[in-house]
Image: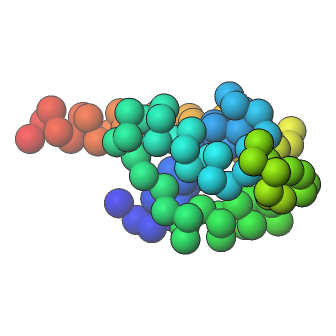
Amino acid sequence: MAKNDLQGSLDLLVLKTLSQAGPLHGYGIVLYIQRASDALLNVEEGSLYPALHRMEQSGWLRSEWALTETGRKAKYYRLTPAGRKQMEEAEKSFDQLVRGVRAVLRYA
């Protein structure tokens, strides 16, 4: 799989997480993905934060500083309308990729 496919998968996971869970800070996104995937997926913070920054610059996310449940200051991310549209397009592309991989696995 090309690096862009992997990057696109991370984008999709983050966008889908925020669409389902609402605004979250980075660590909250990591925990949500871990829980939702039954610990099959582990997003490294070193990959997540550059992706969040890139998606924010693309206009897919907005962020604001707020206090966490423990009283620490954290940046919370929320999905924008452009992010929702990107998520829908990424879901279609991912579904197509999965269908293609399944077809090849069945063929072999």
The answer to whether one can see residue 51 in this image is yes
* Residue in the picture at 89% in, 57% down: 65
Name above or below for residue 36 compared with residue 80: above
Q: Look at the image and tell me in which quarter the N terminus lies.
A: bottom left
Q: Position of residue 79 (x, y in %)?
A: 80, 42
- Residue 55 percent location from the top left of the image: 74, 59
Residue 93 visible in the current orientation: no
Give the residue drawn at x 63%, y 53%: 27
What's the residue at 38%, 40% (across, down)?
39
- Residue most extreme to the top: 20
At which x and y percent is residue 51?
Answer: 65, 64
Q: Horizontally, is 41 left or right of 103 in the view?
A: right
Q: Provide residue 108's location: percent of width, then percent of height.
A: 8, 41
- Which quadrant of the view contains residue 86? top right
Task: Note whether 19 is above or below 31 in the view shown.
Answer: above
Image mark count: 0
Residue, x 75% and y 67% (percent of image)? 53
Q: Looking at this view, is 97 or 62 the one in front?
A: 62
Q: Nearer the viewer, residue 85 or 42?
A: 42
